[in-house]
Image (cartoon, coloured by chain):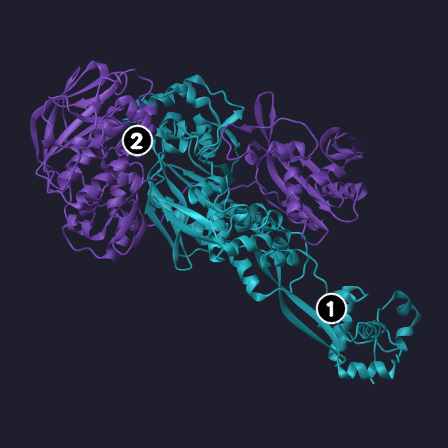
Chain colours: A cyan, B purple
Amino acid sequence: MEILSPLEKQLLLLLEKHGGKAEPEQLEMELVKVMNAASWLQSKGLVGMEEKLIKEYELTEEGERFLKEGLPEKNLLKGLKKASLEEIENKLGRKEAAIAIGWAKRKGWCDIVKEGDKKYLVVTEKGKEEVAKEQAEEEALEKIKEGNFEIDEEIINVLKRREAIREKERVKRSIFLTEKGWNVIKAGIKIEEEISQLTPEIIKSGEWKKKKFRKYDVKAFAPSIYPGKLHPMTQLIEKIRKIFAEIGFKEIRGSYVESCFWNMDALFIPQDHPARDMQDTFYCKKPDRIKIDRKLIEKIAKVHENGWKTGSKGWGYKFDEREAEKALLRTHTTVNTIRYLAHNPEPPAKVFSIERVFRRENIDSTHLPEFHQIEGIVYEKDANFCMLKGILKEFYNRMGFEKIRFRPSYFPYTEPSLEIEVRWQRKWIELGGAGIFRPEVTLPFGIEEPVLAWGLGLERMAMILLGLNDIRMLYFSDINWLRNLPLL
Amino acid sequence: MPVVNFDYYDLLSLLGREVSREELLEKIPMMGVCIERFEGNEISIEVFPNRPDLLSVEGMARALRAFLGIEEGLKKYDVAPPKISLHVEKSVEKVRPFIAAAIVRNVEMNDEIIASLMEVQEKLHFSVGKDRKKMAIGVHDFDKVTPPFVYKGVKPNEIKFVPLGKEEEMDLNEILEKHEKGIAYAHLIKHSDLYPIILDKNGNVLSFPPIINGELTALNEYTKNIFIDVTGTDMNAVLAALNIVATSLAERGGKLEQVEIIGKKKIITPDLTPQENEVSIDYIKKILKIEDEKEILKSLLKMGHDVVKEGNKIKVYSPVWRVDILHAIDLIEDVAIGYGYEKFEDMLPKAMIFGSSFSHDRIHQTMIGLGFNEVVTLSISSPEKEFEKMGIAGEAVEIANPISSEHSILRQSLLPSLLEILSKNRHNDLPQQIYEIGDVVIFEKGRAKQKTFLAGVKIDAKTGFTECKSVVEAILRNLGYKMDVEEKMHGSFIEGRCASIMVNGMEIGYFGEIKPSVICNFGLEYPVIAFEIDLSKLLPSFYE
């Protein structure tokens, strides 16, 4: 005869009440306790547990619509004998018309007849009859809505094809009494007293000396707990911060709302550059302008027009000074570094920033209207192209990327320019751009030595390191995903 | 960025040598363009906006021939002096002042040439032409018309002709109203009462730029001699496009011939005289650390320049279609590309500087210790989320051209985004407690002021003001501050259950129980507590 705890005994009796088999959730007992007791009883061979994958369905938006408004083919044919396809399309819209006509035809409710160069839909006898009746699909949709899934497979398939329903799989767990379990119940249950929960009283009274401790099933279910933690992007940012600080870089910060002047003009981005379009850059209505020193604008205007004293030809167009004070949401953090340099024109400097930038993108799985850039510069006597390669390689090595490649690229404010790619799962992935600031960018601010500069993507790196294929996961986080994500 | 599409075998025939697919895949990206696709025989290459000369297969082949060492140095073409002229009348000055033209004779027309011409025109119209605004190209069968030509402004109903691809004559107004190209580009000339037109000696219409050519001069497989016109509002763009299109046809075996353009001044186009620039060898060595001067010269040849070394300077003769050379630094980049980016050694900066960073370590540690999960949310928000749902009024930085009304302002508080995260997590187990450290932008007196905030929310079946107060007090204790509180009225919180957080007599934030109406606005069904602290005020030395 097995020794049973009060809980085990309770569970056996509950199972008996439910006819010997039940889902844990159906039992009149806390779920944690049920699972605990069940696993004990299972190890004693008194109950068994089974898991079955069952299919359930739910209505899609389309399905809800069918249910509310009726099937499109039915709506189409209601009160109709004949109509030109063009007329139907005009009435229902091209997409809806295609669905309605397609299904009506498939069901043999109509024929398509050609008269002249126009096509007509003619309702068949069958069509007339069927339109008045409730269709099997409609009946099935109602059942699904009520949570009843006893529906003919064929109808289910039709509804799936019409994207009216979605399949969900659910694991159905149940606990049942074994033959041995039934025998125990029939024999009646006797319990020998033993210690389950150790209490201060038991310790103080010395009662523990006289009694046995009930053995616990160490494999029994324990509820999950979740400690607080940093968002994975912050973990990544902290790691990057550490790397740059360790190799002697100073972090700087800037502002989201910037002027065209600092974001574009000072960086020698011509006024007709496509990136400045309303299509690509967010401009501000409030505030719409940001005051800039006139003299500075005039100097930069000359750089654009004829190169000023930089040795450049300039872009050779007439600079519109009114553009410079327009307010925008910064499109890159290069604006942080050029501002820093303008205020600190004496070398050396090594600064970086990891901040948000804004581009006029619609939200989808690979785009967001705001994201982070890892920006940095090295400004010292005789800074050169080889150092730029070296420092970027060092950074990506420390981030865990072993193979790094540099390709020629183009940015209006750097020359030479390069693009950085890392090898990841047998592919080259582009992670950022870099270059040496053009003399047209540096000389107007009295910056005489070469400035090595880079702007690297953070989100893309986060996505490959976290194995994500949807960037939205980062900004619209599912708390369960965060709870279960291991630390980086 | 523009993408050029062409055929592998067409490229090979222009290269004049067998080059394997593998070699192209490896070398093309190292020349400064991106291979977007190379499937079967179709190649698509993305070209950066500084190199419009690569926007045709002929231009790409020309650059590759030099880069691969098939034909190094400056590419020269024979150009015959002008035999015909084009007269520019004053009447066109206000609407589209500039024009340049070229003749290409003895072209052996085939499908590839026609396809490539279409491709290069389209790509140039977009990139250099800014969708035909700065310049537009017309290509004509020269033998269908009689020189000299005239470029002038005419009244919209003064002239009728059959536009390309149509069968009936239309006047200029009809074209702008009915023709698909007319509708698309009318805005470029609509401001003027005279419209630009190019006519031949007998009044035949070659083109109604930048809208459409005449059907009369349409190219076909029998076309032998081609007339190219480029009109525009920017002379540099006009000349660049003409040189690129004309030399593309010369690459196909056509013979270039100049045209005399007689307007206020007389010019002769195309003018392929190379650009002359000087770079100091020291400058190259300083930027690139290439010590071997022979390598420097060879690299420039591989990028299609001719070079003459003069003392410690190099005279560089660059093709006129290289419109990206503004400064000696642009030639230095060509040295780097010609040399090969992969060949540079890695060096590290020498300056000794101590690093420092703005880590929020102490705050993160505290929040994690309290069992809060950090989240990151977007800073672009909506008035609905920031104000209406929160039951408050206020002002914020506003975007003039938002992607949607849901993303039209900058957040001025973190709480709305945190409540939104809770609303997206209704299906997950309670309790949920989340926080964010992030920047908000306050719009005050016409100016945007950025601040760093810390905010947290907790949702649970049972939670309230006291718990929230304990949390906020714990945060401030960890940061070394003693907290005072004062009663506060705030539209998002239940009256009498909201308090200001006071440190040294200054309000640095607030906390309390969120109003049921706000809870409902976010689709939530359980009590929520919330706090927000202005870190820029609490720790000004760190955050300001």
Residue at 52% in and 57% down: A126
10 Å neighbourhood of mark 2: few (<14), some, or many (≥20)? some
Q: Chain of mark 2?
A: B
Answer above or below: position of B436 versus A272: below
Q: Which residue is mark 2?
A: B181
- For the residue labelled by badge 1, is the local secondary structure a helix, a strand or a loop? loop
- Direction front: furthest residue: A125
Instruction: Say if B170 sits above or below A180 in the image.
Output: above
User: Does residue A303 appear to the left or right of B269 in the view shown?
Assistant: right
Which label number is shown at residue B16? none
Inspect the image, locate mark 2, and give the three-letter code of the amino acid beneath it. Answer: Lys
Query: Depth check: A2 or A178 in front?
Result: A178
Q: Secondary structure at mark 2?
A: helix
Q: Who is closer to the viewer here, B372 or A138? A: A138
Circle 1: is it few (<14), some (14-19), or many (20+) Cα within 10 Å?
Answer: some
The quarter of the image holding the N terminus of chain B is: top left
Kind of residue indicated by mark 1: Glu
The vertical placement of A172 against A57, above or below, is: below
> Where residue B230 sits: x, y (%)?
21, 28
Please identify the quadrant where the C terminus of chain B is shown: top right
Percent x, y of residue A142: 65, 56
Residue that numbered label 1 is attached to: A23
Taking the image as shown, residue A425 lies to the left or right of residue B87, namely right
